[in-house]
Image (cartoon, rainbow, N blue to C red):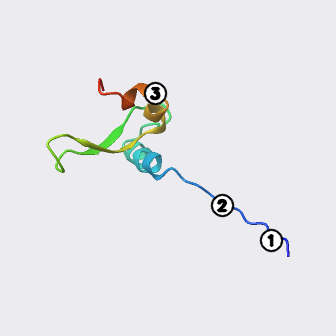
Amino acid sequence: MNKKETFVAIDLKSFYASVECRERNLDPMDVNLVVADESRTAKTICLAVSPALKSWSAWQTEAF
């Protein structure tokens, strides 16, 4: 039997950041937003970034 399956992949990290943007009436495609938890370590842990920030590859460098 030729069964056709469909798979959907969702970038949950961008999803969480997008939800945070929408909660603040911001456009996640235009706003650079980071969801972080500074209580975990002495250095802030980045949990999620908005799609706008994700498209800006410099956020991954130590200069950020």
State the residue in front, 25 or 51: 51
Q: Residue at x 48, y 38 (%)?
A: 51
Image location (x, y in percent) of residue 6: 71, 62
- Amino acid type, label 3: Trp
- Residue 42, quarter of picture: top left
Which label's residue is closer to the chain start, 2 or 3? 2
Per the rendering, the mark at residue 7 is: 2
Q: Which quadrant does the C terminus fall into?
A: top left
Above or below: residue 48 compared with residue 31: below
Query: Residue reaching furthest bottom?
Result: 1
Q: Circle 1 sits on which residue?
A: 3
Q: Quadrant of residue 38?
A: top left
The residue at which mark 3 appears reads as 56
Amino acid type, mark 1: Lys
Toward the viewer: 21 or 63? 63
Q: Is residue 45 left or right of residue 51?
A: left
